[in-house]
Amino acid sequence: MEIRNVGVEEELLLVEAGAHRPAPVAEDVVARSPRDRPGGDRLVEHELKREQVEIGSPATTSMADLHAELVRLRRAAAETAAARGSTVVAVATSPERSEPSTTPDPRYERLTAEYGLLARQQLVCGQHVHVGTASRAEGVGVLDQLRGWLPVLTAVSANSPYWQGQDTGYQSFRSVLWGRWPTAGPTEVFGTVAAYDATVAELLESGTVLDDGMIYFDARLSVHYPTVEIRVADVCTDVRDAVLVAALARALVDTAASRWQAGEPAPPIRTVLLRAAAWRAARSGLAGELVDPRTGKPVPGWQLVGELVELVGPALDRAGDAQLVADGLARLRAHGTGADRQRAAFAARASLRDVVADAAARTLHG
């Protein structure tokens, strides 16, 4: 069996060097960013807010290559940002207070006008993992099979405890903020490509979304690539955590595809329970309880992580990722998630500037 390609998109916060406040300099940073090749995409791209940029790795089958590419792209973005007196930080929300501003782009401006305060406040940074699929039919089968396990990826990646100058009490407050969009969150079982396409068409026809770029499902078929795109993770400060999330996501997709190919029915989990499970993961991360997708009952977070690893173990072995995942989870147990590390940085002097400074340094560490 071929190893599936994987690629990662990361949204990064732009902050003033030294002061660590969000910096509205994205247009200049993107304009200064080099292209990967003549006529190709820039290394750094725009996002909704002028205080953030996006980077995206090429597809690869190697987690070592993915790690190296994310380090390269983060450092390239930081080097470009330095020319504007700023740097990039891989945190999913800004710890410091900010009044984010919209990137001057017709679509973004229309989105801000249509969605009001929701759009004006939407300075959040996620990690999107693309995993290759053989067909759209396989992709829909994967979406139906994996939906119950996605909150575990949120918990593993949790990296947004602070927002607008305060501790939110959440491990992933980005997830809560993101969930306010009309199409965000878990989905029903689709069953067929036709049903998936009909759902998207109905949302577009409802007038509640501007275009298919606003289909913000927790996992969706990519519009541009032959992939399933998993969108539940916070951007991770430590690039090793980003690669861990990508390895787990690929193994989950591979396992889901195998079950679909074998004709196993999708688990009949009610979407309302999936929403509750997603909230629980955002609130507790790995430190508390998560919702077991098979029983709907609360279980210790680390126990459910172990059961996910057991479930996807054969896929991890096929891809050669079992040791990487074991090492990554051992590191999280020893040092905590991104949210834990942010709170530890704050505890030393009760300083949010320390939180940002620490994250800025770790963002560019190889």
Image: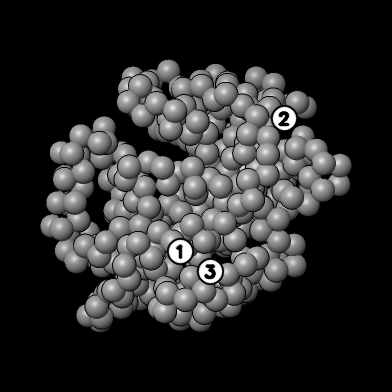
Q: Which mark is on residue 119?
A: none
Label 3 vs 2, first from the N-terminus: 2
Are the residues at dot 3 and dot 1 in contact (C-beta closer than 8 Å)? yes
Give the residue number, with chain letter if any, for mark 2: 20
**Relative vertical location of residue 127 with respect to residue 295 in this rendering, above or below:** above
Q: Which mark is on residue 277?
A: 1
Name the spot of residue 254 as percent of width and height, x first: 38, 71
Tell me which residue sits at (55%, 73%) in the image.
305
Residue 147 at least partly seen? yes
Q: Is residue 334 left or right of residue 282?
A: right
Q: Quadrant of the N terminus?
A: bottom left
Label 1 vs 2, first from the N-terminus: 2
**Relative vertical location of residue 233 with respect to residue 109 in this rendering, above or below:** below
Which mark is in front, 1 or 2?
A: 1
Badge 3: few (under 14), some or many (20 or more) residues near its Cα, within 10 Å? many
Give the residue number, with chain letter if any, for mark 3: 290
Say which amino acid is labelled 2. Answer: His
Tell me which residue sits at (66%, 58%) in the image.
337
**Secondary structure under the numbered disc 3 in the rendered image:** strand
**Secondary structure under the numbered disc 1 in the rendered image:** helix
Say which amino acid is labelled 1. Answer: Ala
